[in-house]
Image (cartoon, rainbow, N blue to C red):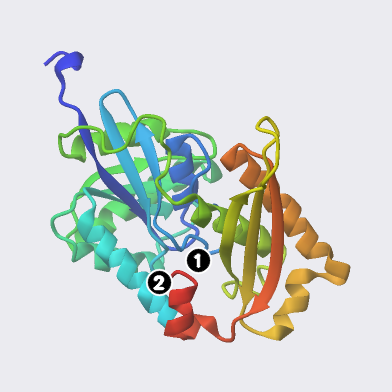
Amino acid sequence: PAPSEAPHRSGFACFVGRPNAGKSTLTNALVGTKVAITSNRPQTTRHTVRGIVHRPDAQLVLVDTPGLHKPRTLLGERLNDVVRATWAEVDVIGFCLPADQRIGPGDRYIAQELAGVRRTPKIAVVTKTDLVDQRELADRLIAVDRLGRELGIEWAEIVPVSAVADRQVGLLADLLVPLLPEGPMLYPEGELTDEPEQVMVAELIREAALEGVRDELPHSIAVVVEEMLPREGRPADRPLLDIHANIFIERSSQKGIVIGPKGSRLKRVGTTSRRQIEALLGTPVFLDLHVKVAKDWQRDPKQLRRLGF
């Protein structure tokens, strides 16, 4: 049929891959704006942040699952359950493997799990191609093909991309779309994510809080936005949003690390995240941050629930 008569498609895709395989950066490149949190340390995406790609012929909703990894804590197990539940519900899975690293046990672990998800089509996405030369890339593509054959996974496509250099990102979208079911738009035009604003704000604060302290406290930071309220009595043309948030850590010894000498680090976290929150929400923000201790929250089901997991 002529392009105008081609049926509209819409559906869900998710990117999987070990932590730091470039999933969130790819999501942002496809959507064209920062929706998923990107950070160069594993385990930063904890929520199903969705990015929505609007096209004339299709609507592709990207579900960003946390990185799958061998669980060591209750939090890890819960994250892995979330991942598997997501895989069963999406229309297509993109398996991200970074071009600059050999296929390792982490990739194999995920591929084995993927092999068990029979019905969902899978595309292998070789990411970060800007970091390697042609020969290395060719080796990686062959290795990915071989991995699929070994485990009985039939890749619908194998696509090299670079989100950073904007190489083949559009092509990836073109290849994902035909794998979606026919149907109307699932979200109104213009929406980029259906993630509640509070969760996105919490993630931006968490990302800023991890900046510079990654090695000392990789996962032991959780952020809860207690409230977001427009400040009363402000003129309509000069609104101000008050945001009160708590940064939770596991041990009181970590408090000094997050706050920094004379409160310098916490101040920087406030400034950095406030700028990003203002850009996200399009309104001036007053950000009130407090650091609190929630003992061993990663291992405590009651606290995990309270912190939103």
Q: Residue at x 38, y 71 (%)?
A: 79
Residues at discs 1 and 2 in contact (Cβ within 8 Å)? yes
Q: Nearer the viewer, residue 289 or 73?
A: 289
Q: Amino acid at mark 2?
A: His
Q: Residues within 10 Å of mark 1 (few under 14, many from 20)?
A: some
Quadrant of residue 58 within the rendered picture:
top left
Mark 1 residue element: loop
Residue 43, numbered circle: 1
Q: Position of residue 276 (x, y in %)?
A: 64, 45
- Disc 1 vs disc 2: which is toward the camera? 1
Residue denoted by label 2 = 69
Q: Position of residue 286 (x, y in %)?
A: 71, 50
Q: Residue at x 68, y 41 (%)?
A: 284
Side of 3 relative to 54 (left or right): left
Q: Amino acid at mark 1?
A: Gln
Side of 107 relative to 276 (left or right): left
Q: CA distance from mark 1 to mark 2?
A: 9 Å
Instruction: For the N terminus, give its image quadrant.
Output: top left
